[in-house]
Amino acid sequence: MTSAVLGSTFGNTITRGKKIGARMMALLILCVVAAALAVGYLAFYWSTQRALDFEVDKEVRLVQSNLKVFRNGLANEAERIAISNKAYASVLSEETNILLDEDLTPTPSTRGDRDIFVILNKDMKPLYTYRRDLPWHSEVFEDQLRGQLDATLSELETRANTKQTQFRVPEPLRSHAPLALSLRDVVLVDGAIGLATVAAITPSTAPPKGMPKVAGYLLWVRSLDIRSIRSFEESTGLSEMFITTNKPKADFQRVSLPLLRRNGEIIANLSWKTTAASGAIYTNSSPYFLGTIIAILLMTILILLRYIKMTDRILQNEADATHAALHDALCGLPNRTWFEIFAADVLRRDRQKQRITGIVFLDLDHFKQINDSLGHSIGDEVIKLVAERLKVSINMEDRVARVSGDEFLIVLAHRTSMDEIIETCMYIEKMLSDAFKVEKHKILTTASMGVSLSPAHGHDLTELLRRADIALYQAKKLGRGRYVLFEKEMEDTLQISREIEEDIKRALNANEFQNYYQPIMDNTGKNILAAEALIRWNHPKKGLLPPAAFLPVAEESMLINRIGEWVLENAIKDGSTLNDVTMCVNVSPTQLRHPEFPELVNTLLEKYQLEPNRLELEVTEDVLINYSETVVEVIERLRNLGVKIALDDFGTGFSSLSYLRRDLFDKIKIDRSFINGAVTDAKAREILASSITLGLRLGMEVCVEGVEEEEQKELLLTMDCPMMQGYLFSRPIPLGKFRLWRDDMDEDVEQKPRKIRVGAAE
């Protein structure tokens, strides 16, 4: 009794432990993803703020520079007037009728409408005040200016009377005075801000013996009115400028510059609408960014599982560069031989000084399309421009080499941290993402980069190059146009991929593969029109394997051609024994790229005496996107044989409608994602109905995939869908069971004695 209780408790403990382990693993994944999203959002906010700060700082410096030039101009003009024998004598004598407008004020072209001019004697007593807008306002100095300028006037008085006598250029020969005997300040006059300039009135030549150095002082106040502000807007290119005595609220739209008194006191702020785009980018993008986080969290586990199952492809290295020369003849960059010598030396020196070295393997994305569509001469020009951008993207001690057509190697030397290498890779990525202009063409391209580090990933150059190559292919698998740092898991995945590749070769010789067939039904769901061939692998150790377990490796190693030929031949052979059933076979991109593929199809049709119109080859949209002209030619030759062509997974790509116009297809197979939810979602139903109607109006057959429920079937009947395919009718089954299932279906249609259980035939 005790042992039974202990056994039950132990079993419950194990079960509970597995559940906890599964939940903890799920929680860990969610936490990691949530942390990554949070870091990404913070990085987005931080980078946007940094960019905004940088742009705003440029605007502030621009305004400061213009303000300084403006104030220097006022000071120059004031000193030009003040350093004058005539002004000196006139003020020293304290004439009551000073010709202010002619002698002691700027010319009308440099004078503002609201400028204030005050002539002070050497004891700081006002002799004359002039103000164009309020000429009777003679008490402005005593009422408003003296208290604000006491310290400034005292400082100027001290400086002017203690300044050593210098050589003075005779007045007729003097073009302007240096900024020597003037001071500037900011004042508040009649509730408005003014720029004040005080200049000492001195003779342009040495003063007579016994006479004072300074006769008096010229005070010039330029009001920062609407006219001045508009002038600043025109000179800076900024807009919506205004002056406020209150500190503006900080936001992404406006910038302010404090106007400081000479004593450092902030008297007002000059504000304007910034032209920086970074703030608007953050404001407009952040809601969408945050809105996608929930969806990303929900999809993360599926995405991770998908990428875990995916295996790395093996990239064959491009042909070795010519050993006769050390530089590439096209773009002038060093070749691989030179690079290996230089990189080995860099690795040795950095290892001695305990510094980090980065090896970058760079490959241009879809460069073959440029050569195919625009010609090799345009492609050569693009390579030259890429080389120039790479050279200006790296430091002086780094080197870049061209090792083959569109592949480059870069050594990033003498780094002290991994962040420096990442920063350089990000800059290279940005430089190559900008459009290239070649002749009349605007060419857009991106680059994929694989990065390995020394000493983290090894010291030997050959090993580092191999690991950078592995990381490069991982970058392409993740969508191209990015850099990827090497990780040990990539190498482990590569080894698994090699093992699967060898196992596929053995399985082909051992005839371990088998075609399964899934029926395609008419609009009633009772008559079989076609059968889609789907390969399975009867593995001696792992059992029955689906295509997803081995086809990705086959596609990467070129074994897909052998597998595709095997599926095609067996489907044609089996089709010759199935009367009135069209055989549907999926065709890979590499098969369609082969110019002799139509001849192979014709040979197999003749060998097994199958009518060409009973063979239907299914292609996907991404095949046409990546290999458009070559594939179109092969498709046209196949149709000339009488073979039907179907566009599979319709609606999941980006170019469906453009290729439908070219009359390349006899049928479209609407992806299963369209039928999902169509029963309950009105919008989904409308999209599905529109897709069916589109295909029918273009004169093509239409088949909807993924029909799994009776309600979906009834819905398609209301849409006049001519063909259906899905688990509702049958899962993919071997040829023998398919024959029995078809016979049962025929018997059920004629007599309806019993209901066929599809699940039993799986």
Image (cartoon, helix red, strand yellow):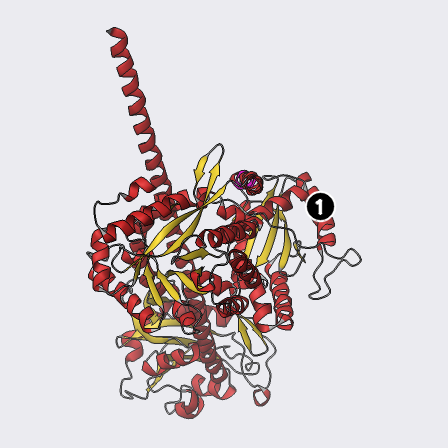
Viewer-proximal residue among 266 and 171 = 266
The chief SS type of the magenta part is: helix
Quick one: 158 or 74, which is closer to the camera? 74
Image mark count: 1
Q: Quadrant of the C terminus?
A: top left
Q: Residue at x 38, y 41 (%)?
A: 32
Does residue 323 appear anywhere in the picture? yes
User: What type is the residue that disc 1 sits on?
Assistant: Ala
Query: Bounds of the magenta span?
Result: 490-495
- Residue 458 magenta: no
Q: Nearer the viewer, residue 569 or 184?
A: 569
Q: Outermost residue, front direction?
A: 751
Q: Position of residue 613 (x, y in %)?
A: 44, 64
- Using the rendered image of the protein, determine whether residue 123 is visible from the camera's viewpoint: no
Query: Percent position (x, y) of residue 322?
Result: 76, 57
Q: Position of residue 410 (x, y in %)?
A: 63, 53
Instruction: Determine the residue located farthest toward the right in the rendered image.
Output: 324
Nearer-the-camera pick, 548 or 320: 548
Q: Secondary structure at mark 1?
A: helix
Is residue 492 on the magenta stretch?
yes
**Residue topped by disc 1:** 344
**Quadrant of the rendered structure where residue 140 is?**
bottom left
Is residue 636 toward the left or the right of residue 407 in the image? left
Quadrant into which the N terminus falls? top left
Q: Alpha-carbon neighbours of circle 1 within 10 Å: few (<14), some, or many (≥20)?
A: some
Whole-percent x and y of residue 172?
Answer: 57, 90
Residue 228, quarter of the rendered image: bottom left
**In this rendering, is residue 712 above or below 667?**
above
